[in-house]
Structures are given as C-alpha cells and as structure tokens.
Amino acid sequence: MGFAAYYLNDPTAPKPNRPVHLGVNVLIEWDGKLLLERRNDCDIWGLPGGGVKGREDETKAIAREVLEETGLRLPVSEFQKIRVYGEPGRIASYRDGSVWRMVIVLYRAVLWEKPVLHPSAESKELRFFTKEELKNIQIVCTHRDLVAENWNSL
C-alpha cells in the first residue's frame, strides 16, 4: 500500500483539511501511444505532473514537472492547454493526515521522435501505452477521467 489515496466524487473520501492544491498534468503522446508513470505514492499508473509552486506560471510548472519526472526537456511552447478540472470531488489524502482538494490544469504534448525516459524517485516506471493496453491497467481515479475525456481512449 502506498502513502497516498486518491478519490473522485467518492462520498467516503476524507474532507480536505488543507488549502486547494493547484496541479498540472500532461497527456504526452508518441507514436500513437500515451505516456504514464507508475507512481511511487500509490503504485498505480498516472499522468506525469505535479503541483504548481507559489506564483509559478502553469506552463513553466508542467515543463518543470515533466523534466523532473521523465527527464524530457520540452519548451513551454510544446504544451497545449486542454482544460481546467476544478470540481470539488477530486481529493488526495496522504499518510501524514493532509487532505487536499485538487484543481488540475491539463496539458497535451506530442513527441515526434522516440524519447529517452529517466524516471524520478516519484516513479517506479515510465511507459507508453496503446489505447488497447490502457483498457487493462489501473489508472489513478483522478487521472482516469482526464485520459478518457481527452485522449479518446477508454
């Protein structure tokens, strides 16, 4: 069991006890496949991304997170903003007792050549998945709908 739990519109989710957390995630595509990371915090597949720091620009935050989590250095111009997910039922709960309501800014980036990936300490594995393969893996619930609605895959 990991040290984080995620909830999406779940009436059994714990109530947030911290300020709203602004995060960024990205659909990174290459060769018709989607990049996911098997997260260390919960051992479930999810989209690369993370928290926006202070007054950091969202596109700079996603470029920073992608570099930190995958080793890919992409200019901010490569990220296309798709949508903001701000509904109140997107919750992250951590072992230290902190519970956050998440607002996620979702981006898309397309890679035109095969990348060399370098997982961070936050990831157990990085892998590209076909649309068919996505049907057979567990994706963290706060990302599954992002993939389904925006990558037309599930």
Image (cartoon, helix red, strand yellow):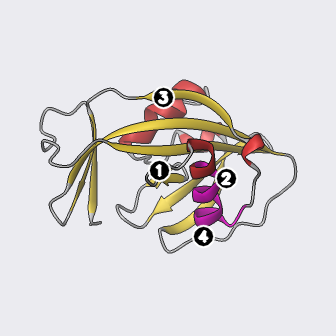
Per the rendering, the mark at residue 84 is 3
Per the rendering, the mark at residue 128 is 2
If you read the primary sequence from the N terminus, does the residue marked by circle 4 or circle 2 appear first?
4
Mark 4: which amino acid?
Pro
| Helix, strand or loop for disc 2 | strand
Q: In the depicted view, which residue is nearer to us: 32 or 4?
A: 4
Left or right placement of residue 68 versus residue 76 in this view: left
Residue found 20% across the figure and 34% down from its top: 10
Q: Quadrant of the N terminus?
A: bottom left
Q: CA distance from mark 4 to mark 2?
A: 13 Å
Residue found 47% across the figure and 68% down from its top: 122
- Magenta span covers which residues? 62-72
If you read the primary sequence from the N terminus, does the residue marked by circle 1 or circle 3 appear first?
1
Count residues near mark 2 (Cα–Cα under 10 Å), then give few for <14, some for 14-19, many for 20+. Answer: some
Residue topped by disc 1? 52
User: What percent of the width, then of the height, locates residue 74?
Assistant: 75, 54
Q: Residue furthest front?
A: 55
